[in-house]
Amino acid sequence: MARAFSFSLVGSDGQARVGEIETPHGRVRTPAFMPVGTQATVKGLAPEQVSAAGADIVLANTYHLMLRPGPERIAALGGLHKFMNWPHAILTDSGGFQVMSLAGLRKIADEGVTFRSHLDGTMYELTPERAIEIQLLLGADIVMQLDECVKLPATRAEIERGVRLSLAWAERCKGAFAHSQPGRALFGIVQGGDEPALRRVSAQTLVEMGFDGYAIGGLAVGESQDVMLRVIEEVAPILPADRPRYLMGVGTPEDLVESVARGMDMFDCVLPTRNGRHGLAFTRFGALNLKNARHADDPRPLDEASVCPAARDYSRAYLHHLVKANEMLGAVLLTAVNLSYYQQLMADMRAAIGQGRFGDFRQQLKESWARGDIPPP
Amino acid sequence: MARAFSFSLVGSDGQARVGEIETPHGRVRTPAFMPVGTQATVKGLAPEQVSAAGADIVLANTYHLMLRPGPERIAALGGLHKFMNWPHAILTDSGGFQVMSLAGLRKIADEGVTFRSHLDGTMYELTPERAIEIQLLLGADIVMQLDECVKLPATRAEIERGVRLSLAWAERCKGAFAHSQPGRALFGIVQGGDEPALRRVSAQTLVEMGFDGYAIGGLAVGESQDVMLRVIEEVAPILPADRPRYLMGVGTPEDLVESVARGMDMFDCVLPTRNGRHGLAFTRFGALNLKNARHADDPRPLDEASVCPAARDYSRAYLHHLVKANEMLGAVLLTAVNLSYYQQLMADMRAAIGQGRFGDFRQQLKESWARGDIPPP
């Protein structure tokens, strides 16, 4: 491996930060958006298209890859980077979140979680130690602790149990990770639902244990943006300034901007890819639903000033046609448009923070979104 | 438009021919394989990927485009080339074949065919004149006459009726086409099923009418390769040497080689694209089914000597995983692999014919396919 994990803060503006993460597979500029490569592929795009959209890092899902094709197989084939032909950084989640949302017959105990595969019904066990082992077999640059992510709304007792279990698993993950190849990073995950006191306990205890980075988990599970932002405001000040802060599973362009404004550095979300497959385009002018008949005769591209060829080279009329005809190319092009827009947004935020004009940038962005789509010709 | 349609024979070897078609949208090297862009898109690939695979021309389907998004709409948007962002040559079929295979409630009369859209049940009429009008609205470089394609096996009476109707429609298509913008080409279509005498009558009558090129239709409809090759042997000698000969809807790599050996110049088929979406790869080593479990741990690319990145940059294990996981990228990569293989095959045939070694080439190709896949490591 080329380089060891490190994080350096390059600049800040208010709470917003711009930085650089070094990983064994290259540099990640923060604030960073990580496209989701669930099953070792960002759906519909070849890796060079993901890179061309501006991504330095992708996320892959331990739950999916442990079921198919299996981490031992991927390791024998040279690891996940080689398997999916992605030479840049990879973060893997721990599998915990998707065990909770996808698997059948879950049983959570102190030891770990047992569950039935949603693919073929096979029983699996995921312990903190196995979660780390799998992520190391995959060869992730950034490894996440196993945690219990409690869906909101939940009782205080449920949230408290999630915090207690996640902290115990964090400690065990740290132990399992200690013997890994040097250079990789392990992130702890703050839980605590919408309970400020529990969030603080979770964050403080993780910081005392010491991790290479800290994530806020258990958000983007149905709560309002207000709740999410309040949790960030509660947690971010507790996290050490010299470690990256990752907000898991978030979010809309506006969520990203508001979270960066509150000191978060890393994000992942299926929104740009999933919505792209369903005919929705994220642009400077807000979100456009290409299914809408008003696009059927519109010769204009989505955004002629975009850096993304898919946003420049095809008319809205053609994209509308592809989406209505359920053509694969529609999903491919809109996925590229959306990832490119998300990456451009991150690049613009990095530049604005670096130049000390993040407040103005944030204001202008909201005005631009509020103006909505450019009027038809 | 830049240039008018023309065809020049560059060389020949036995019955096999190598040539060049000039069109208003560039040159088409023959023997040529035309990827099928049914609904104004070669499924899954951006136009630059189709071009990078080596295609000079694509085919688009009048039936699909007349239903959605409609030829008048495409014309208002600047024509099909601009609509699908494909600056190279386009051939459109007449819609007849797909009316027969997809539409409901067909009624064929001397005047034309009325049918119910398979999308929304709307009634449409397709006459020879409307078939030409639609193709001219789309802006096709090569326009096909409306014909009646009779499915085999069929009675002699049915085949005879198809020939009579197709010849009458050929005459009317010629009349309708006469007033079009100059530079484009109109091809007649030889029908006659598996009846040699009817095939001869059809071909001779069309040649007397005079077309820019001649197609053999009504094949690849379930008959054996023997029947198909016998029809070609019957028809090709009747067709003028100075016009391109297009075998519609064909075929497998072996079909292409055998048809070129019998004097055919142009082909279209959904096989490389459809099979790619279903996990089948065409390679120098024959066809490989990537669904097969034997690929699950195979680190080798499909063909490290391929000009196609998708055949070189990904392991068989990864392609197997994508196909098993039903990931869009699997369909995209295998479509690219297959189109690239088909185009490479055409390029190799052109080179072999030009160098007077087509017989040897054909022999070596069959031996290579017969040897099958390279053995696992």
Image (cartoon, coloured by chain):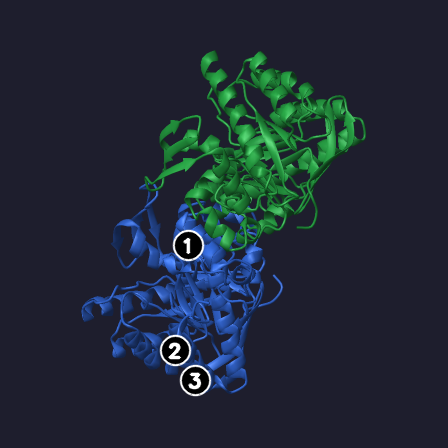
Chain colours: A green, B blue
Numbered tag placed on residue B49 in the rendering: none
Q: Which mark is residue B277?
A: 1
Relative placement, left or right, of A67 versus B85 is left
User: Label 1 sits on what residue type?
Assistant: Arg
**Who comes first in sequence, dot 3 or dot 2?**
3
* Residue placed under numbered mark 3 in the picture: B15
What's the residue type where badge 2 is placed?
Glu
Expressed as whole percent of the image width and height from the top left, the position of residue A52 reads: 64, 47
Q: Residue at x 46, y 34 (%)?
A: A127
Image spot of residue A183 (x, y percent): 66, 43
User: Mark 2 highlights which residue?
Assistant: B258
Local secondary structure at mark 2? helix
- Three-letter amino acid code of the residue under disc 3: Gln
The CA distance from mark 1 to mark 3 is 34 Å
What is the CA distance from the residue labelled 1 to the residue labelled 2? 26 Å
Q: Which tag is nearer the camera, tag 1 or tag 3?
A: 1
Question: Residue B142, relative to residue B16: is it above or below?
Answer: above
Chain to which mark 1 belongs = B
